[in-house]
Image (cartoon, rainbow, N blue to C red):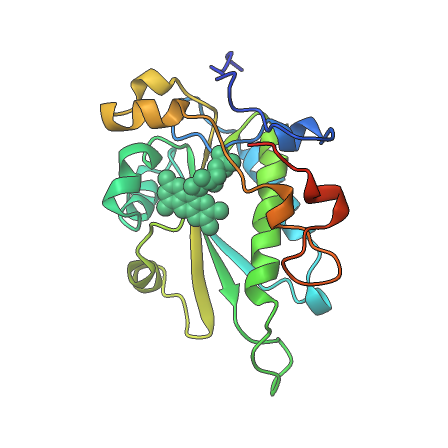
Amino acid sequence: MTDHPTLDNKTAVTRAAIHELLANRWSRRAFSDEPVSTDTVLSLMESARWTASSNNEQPWRFIVATRDDPDAHGQMVSCINAGNQRWATRAWVLMVGIARDNFDVEGQPNNRFSEYDTGQAVQSLVTQATALGLNVRQMGGILPDRVREIYSVPEGYTIMAGLAIGYPGDPDELVEALRDRERLPRSRRPLSALFFSGQFGQPHPLAESDDQP
Ligand SMILES: Cc1cc2nc3c(=O)[nH]c(=O)nc-3n(C[C@H](O)[C@H](O)[C@H](O)COP(=O)(O)O)c2cc1C
């Protein structure tokens, strides 16, 4: 595996230590041409498969395309919007995440945790990918109707988001419009806007004096 370029302003700034897999993950647009092995793709699949889900429904489904199959890869690229195609085309692995809307058991519609669980499966995959030195950038900017048509996705399944997955690349190789954006520091809402006690909106005492960016 080659050395991957890093940007030193991207590590999460936290008031308490978090695991380096979480602190150092960020969503690069810059991908290298380095192939991702089939074993590694299989690891990503397994990481998603073993995610927790409500009622163990496992409502997530993924369509996967890799650059070593140019037709399949091109087909999936055609499901990504123009803005995202500027960087995502280079990613070795492309996926689309899909959520099954209903429970498996007949007569039980509307699994309200379907999209929640599918997002969790994606987070498992992202964490596994990060541990393997891969980068993932997710994409809401895909064309769901086209995904449904090309891959014959049945009714009762919701097309969620795309994933571009591959080894990190050199930001200087991005199109000019994206180079500076790739170097911007990451930001988050303060803990006090996210963690409450007593009443909704009332910061939890641990979060109150939060003045981190
Ligand atoms: C569901 C979802 C959809 C996203 N859609 C896009 C997208 O269409 N294009 C894009 O460039 N980034 C997209 N992103 C990446 C986010 O902008 C990025 O995760 C966010 O800015 C936080 O940055 P970080 O992941 O580096 O911490 C998406 C992320 C998620 C989770």
Q: Nearer the viewer, residue 135 or 62?
A: 135
Q: Can residue 67 be seen in this view?
A: yes
Q: In which quarter of the image is ligand 1?
A: top left
Residue 29: give x, y in percent of width and height: 39, 30
Residue 52: give x, y in percent of width and height: 71, 56
Res 125 → quadrant:
top right
Residue 202: give x, y in percent of width and height: 67, 56
- Count of marks overlaid on the render: 0
Quarter of the picture holding the N terminus: top right
| Vertical comparison of 42 with 212: above or below | below
Q: Nearer the viewer, residue 7 or 32?
A: 7
The residue most toward the top is 3
Quarter of the picture holding the C terminus: top right
Residue 5: give x, y in percent of width and height: 47, 14
Q: Can residue 95 be seen in this view?
A: no
Give the left or right position of residue 34, taking residue 80 as reference: right
Res 180 → quadrant:
top left
Q: Which residue is drawn at 58% across and 34% down?
A: 129
Give the left or right position of residue 69, taking residue 110 as reference: left
Q: Residue at x 52, y 58 (%)?
A: 61
Q: Nearer the viewer, residue 40 or 13?
A: 13
Give the left or right position of residue 210, taking residue 170 as reference: right
Q: Which residue is drawn at 66% across and 67% down?
A: 57
Q: Residue at x 55, y 63 (%)?
A: 115
